[in-house]
Amino acid sequence: MEKSTRKKTSSWYRQLSTWKIAISATLNDPKLLKKAISCGYSKKDLESALTWHKEILELDEIKEVAYGRKYAATDNCIQAKNNLHKVYMRHLSLARVVFKKDRGTLEKLSANGKRKSALVDWLSDVRKFYNIALSETEIKNIFKNKGIAPEELEKGIELTNEVELLSQTQKQLTDEAVIATYNRDEKISILRNWYTEFNATTKIVGKEFAFDFNSESKKKNAIQD
């Protein structure tokens, strides 16, 4: 309900409503329609403009759904990343203590540097850590002796894969949301340009038509309100 109210008070939505009322008023009034036709706008032109109006609303719904999916994917990705971070930091902290005097092993585990800020780089370090910890028997046994079973290290790989997959999904859905917004805005621009020209052209015909058109539009608006 809140989203619907916010949308209806937005600038583009108010403009859209105004355009629809004006076009519908012209179509429904024989006198206005006749004068519109004399300005070069056929009934089919006006009906096409109403079709654009309908398409804009449909595209806006597509955009809303796309952003809903994108936000859900973002939340899932953040949750998965937090789960991985909790597990990984526990294993990383242990490795830094156990291999404190073994810089070679710390280097192999990517455990002796600062955490990468970019997600893709951080995941690369995490994946390297677990791959080395599981593939090198000596390191795996040291972890096991310190209470970290191979299954826990494998869980780290699983969580890494999950975050990577969810991150890709998030990016894909973000792209879809951006495209959906672009498609809607492009159609709004088309109708806005058409209506601006239509309004300017019909007013050029003479004060009588401009007066009739505006008063009729306001009348239709009052009825709908």
Image (tube, helix red, strand yellow):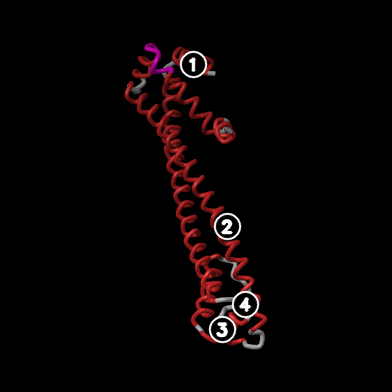
Label 3 or label 2, whichever comes before in sequence order:
2
Query: x, y percentage for residue 4?
Result: 55, 33
Residue located 66% across and 88% down the image: 101
The residue where tag 4 is placed is 147
Q: Which amino acid does label 4 sit on?
A: Gly
Name the front one of labels 1 and 2: 2
Q: What residue type is labelled 3?
A: Asn
Q: Circle 4 — which element? A: loop
Label 4 or label 3, whichever comes before in sequence order:
3
The Cα atoms of the two marked residues, 4 and 3, are separated by 10 Å
Label 1 or label 4, whichever comes before in sequence order:
4
Q: State which quarter of the image contains the N terminus.
A: top right
Disc marking residue 171: none
Q: 48 or 5: which is nearer to us?
A: 5
Instruction: Tell whether label 3 touches label 1 (CB within 8 Å).
Output: no
Name the front one of labels 3 and 2: 3
Query: x, y percentage for residue 7?
Result: 55, 34
Query: x, y percentage for residue 193?
Result: 43, 33
Name the front one of labels 4 and 2: 4
Label 1 or label 2, whichever comes before in sequence order:
2
The Cα atoms of the two marked residues, 4 and 2, are separated by 28 Å
Mark 3 nearby-residue class (10 Å; few <14, some 14–19, many ≥20): some
Q: Hey, which quadrant is residue 29 in on the image?
A: top left
Disc marking residue 78: 2
Q: Circle 1 — which element? A: helix
Disc marking residue 141: 3
Q: Is the residue 175 above or below the residue 10 in the image?
A: below
Q: Is the residue 181 above or below the residue 23 in the image?
A: below
Q: Circle 3 — which element? A: helix
Residue 117 covered by magenta stretch: no
Mark 1 nearby-residue class (10 Å; few <14, some 14–19, many ≥20): some
